[in-house]
Image (cartoon, helix red, strand yellow):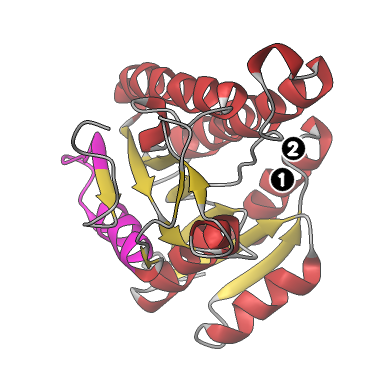
Amino acid sequence: MSEAKKIAVVTGAGTGVGRAAALALMNTGFTVVLAGRRLDKLEETAKLGPEGKSLCVPADMTDPGSIAALFAKVAQTYGRLDVLFNNAGMGAPPVNFEDLSLEHWQAVVNTNLTGPFLCTQHAFRIMKDQTPRGGRIINNGSISAHAPRPFSAAYTSTKHAITGLTRASNLDGRMYDIAVGQVDIGNAATPMTDRMVAGPGVMQADGTMKHEPRMDAKAVGDAVAYMAGLPLDANVLFMTVMATKMPFVGRG
């Protein structure tokens, strides 16, 4: 393996923001390990990028053993890891707060918070012992952490917690030359946000339903690639990438 080869892992790489980020990283020179539950979707992403610049590894972010196997595969295949994009995430059904089941709450916590925590631990172990030492971890946060939507307690809580994980792991990573940052995304056009432009739209804070503007997910992918391409003595700690006309800034 050439020392110049840069290796990245993207979780949830089969669709949406994960796919956009994986393609942006491949197009800027990274070899990207595409991780996700559905091999067919990972293979679709791989075919959209440059030939020979990706490796598909099915992985379940709710399964610690599956996460461990993912990073073992990275270490075995490439011997190093330069960038991890903790992207995989999910929400719970939009029900009244008091009706949210413990099962749904725990599923969101396991995917959105425990998964990134475990991935970050594995990345630390690889990055601190490789030569050259260090690397970069980028977490997918959300502007929902600062301005929640109705009926989103589980999603909002985990994305708020991701900010704590970003700050803490950035601090703890300093001694190993590991930089950690976060991208907060608003209304990227992905399958997850199709409901924003279909039917009645999405619920607003006052209970009304409205369509909301979206942006091309490529804008997010390009932002992730920018963060990933920085030298390790520079870091984007937090970046917000949002649809310009979405109803986020202002009063409802």
Question: Dot 1: what SS?
Answer: helix
| Rendered location of residue 21, percent (x, y) | 44, 63
Is the C terminus in the top left, top right, bottom left or bottom right quadrant?
top left
The correct choice, above or below, for 87 with respect to 57 in the image is above
Q: Is residue 221 magenta?
A: yes
Q: Which residues are magenta?
A: 219-239
The correct choice, above or below, for 247 with respect to 27 in the image is above
Q: Which residue is mark 2?
A: 68
Residue 14 in sight: yes
Q: CA distance from mark 2 to mark 1?
A: 6 Å
Q: Which residue is mark 1?
A: 72
Are discs 2 and 1 less than 8 Å apart at CB?
Answer: yes
| Rendered location of residue 54, percent (x, y) | 58, 73
Depth check: 135 or 105 in front?
Answer: 105
Which residue is depicted at the point 58% across and 27% down? 151
| 35 horizontally vs 240: left or right | right
Residue type for callout 2? Ala
| 88 horizontally vs 171: left or right | right
Q: Is residue 172 magenta?
A: no
The correct choice, above or below, for 21 with respect to 92 in the image is below
Numbered badge on residue 131: none
| Rendered location of residue 177, percent (x, y) | 30, 32
Extreme residue in the top direction = 98
Which residue is depicted at the point 40% across and 27% down? 145
| 89 horizontally vs 239: left or right | right
